[in-house]
Image (cartoon, rainbow, N blue to C red):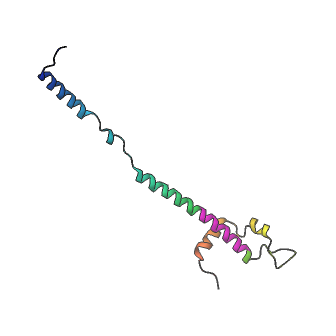
Amino acid sequence: MKEISKERKAAEGKVMHIYKESSPAVENLYEFSYINHIAWTAAVVLLGLVVWLSVALVNAENQRHALMTKQCQDKVFTTEIDKKCLRMVDSREHWWQHLHYALTHTSPEV
């Protein structure tokens, strides 16, 4: 085998150094941002919670208004409540009316 001279080794070392420096750094090649994923996930979960609580509030206000206006009074026993009617009643025309009333009237009426 032929021995490689020191000059040639030095020249190859310089070329390899140039190629090594021109290659991309693997650790910085892809950008990972877990904080954005956490923030968006938290925002979606909180939005889902707000929607779920709004639906529950609309249902509760619908039943409360039906009880206050005596829309679900039992026909036979006038002191009793028709629970099937209470589940199915629409005491106001639109769901947003229930939501608006519930959000604006936080204390009971006197």
Coordinates of residue 110 in the picture (x, y in percent): 65, 86
The foreground one among 94 and 16 is: 16
**Can see residue 96?**
no
The foreground one among 76 and 94 is: 76
Q: Is residue 11 magenta?
A: no
Residue at horizontal 38%, vertical 46%? 32
Q: Is 94 on the left-hand or right-hand side of 46?
A: right
Q: Is residue 107 above or below residue 14?
A: below
Q: Is 103 on the left-hand or right-hand side of 77?
A: left
Q: Check the image and name the residue furthest to the right.
A: 76
The foreground one among 48 and 12 is: 12
Residue at horizontal 67%, vertical 65%? 94
Coordinates of residue 65 in the picture (x, y in percent): 70, 74
The foreground one among 83 and 20 is: 20
For the stretch drawn in magenta, the main secondary structure is helix
Q: Is 36 on the left-hand or right-hand side of 90?
A: left
Tell me which corner region of the image, top left, top right, bottom left or bottom right, holds residue 95: bottom right
Residue at horizontal 56%, vertical 62%? 49
Q: Check the image and name the residue furthest to the bottom.
A: 110
Coordinates of residue 13 in the picture (x, y in percent): 18, 28
**Can see residue 81?**
yes
Q: Is residue 51 above or below residue 19?
A: below
Residue at horizontal 67%, vertical 70%? 60
Q: Check the image and name the residue furthest to the front.
A: 1
Coordinates of residue 52 in the picture (x, y in percent): 60, 62
Read off the magenta span: 52-66
Image quadrant in which the N terminus is located = top left
Q: Check the image and name the residue furthest to the left.
A: 7
Tell me which corner region of the image, top left, top right, bottom left or bottom right, holds residue 92: bottom right
Q: Is residue 102 above or below residue 2?
A: below
